[in-house]
Image (cartoon, rainbow, N blue to C red):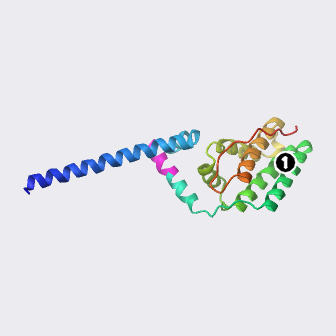
Amino acid sequence: MENGTIVIAILVAAGVAVAAWFIWRSKRHKALVRRYGPEYERVVRDVGNPSRADRELEAREKRVSGFKLRELNPEERERYLGEWARIQQLFVDQPAQAVTSAHELLMALMRDRGYPDSPLEQRQQDLSVHYPNLIDSYRNACAVAQVPATSGAANTERLRMATIHYRTLFNALLNDATTGRDEVPERQEVAS
């Protein structure tokens, strides 16, 4: 074989490899956009461009794949359901305290399912891997929960919505398999 033929074969092989890589990246990008939806757009805004967003979401997936997530046993589920019922009753007289309690119960549920104790932002990123369609609601609920009750900034309607958002993620974490299904259960009303 002549040197020219060898060089051409190497260039063709390299071109095919580069094209295959670009096709794979494009498919992966489209899959991330489809899977994460609004969370994908939020990450793009945060990191500045789609390539960085893809890397960020892939890093989240890699981190979460190392968690030992588990389903709850029936006794644990019943205990959590009882705690949630107590929170709903508490909401009637003390809505701010009910939101704080809902936040704490959700954190305990996450720990029992196998999510590590992490700062809030990291916890939100971790949850976004399995629950990308619920994570914005969870962020909003956390923002309300962080407002001091004495400030008056979190009125009863905002507290009610925060409780509903917590309940939605609570139901998803309580009822799904360890891989997460991101299904939104029927809307649960909270007394106000």
Q: Residue furthest top?
A: 157
**Residue 16: % across, % down:** 27, 48
Residue at the spot of label 1 = 98
Identity of the residue drawn at 11% across and 52% down: 5
Q: Residue furthest left?
A: 2
**Residue 66: % across, % down:** 57, 63
| One can see residue 4 in this view | yes
Location of the N terminus by quadrant is: bottom left
Q: Horizontally, is 137 left or right of 125 in the view?
A: right
Q: Horizontally, is 159 left or right of 14 in the view?
A: right
Q: Horizontally, is 131 left or right of 153 in the view?
A: left
Identity of the residue drawn at 47% across and 41% down: 30
Residue 54 painted magenta: yes
**Residue 117: % across, % down:** 68, 61
Location of the C terminus by quadrant is: top right
- Front-most of residues 71 and 60: 71
Q: Residue furthest right?
A: 93
Identity of the residue drawn at 14% across and 53% down: 7
Structural crowding at the residue carrying mark 1, measured as other residues with C-alpha within 10 Å and reported as few (<14), some (14–19) or many (≥20): many
Secondary structure beneath dot 1 equals helix
**Range covered by the magenta-colored residues:** 49-57
Indicate whether 150 appears above or below 76: above
Would you say the magenta stretch is mainly helix, strand or loop?
A: helix
| One can see residue 45 in this view | no
Indicate whether 187 appears above or below 103: above
**Residue 89: % across, % down:** 90, 46
Number of numbered callouts drawn: 1
Residue 141 painted magenta: no
- Front-most of residues 12 and 129: 12
Type of the residue with mark 1: Ala
Identity of the residue drawn at 90% across and 47% down: 90
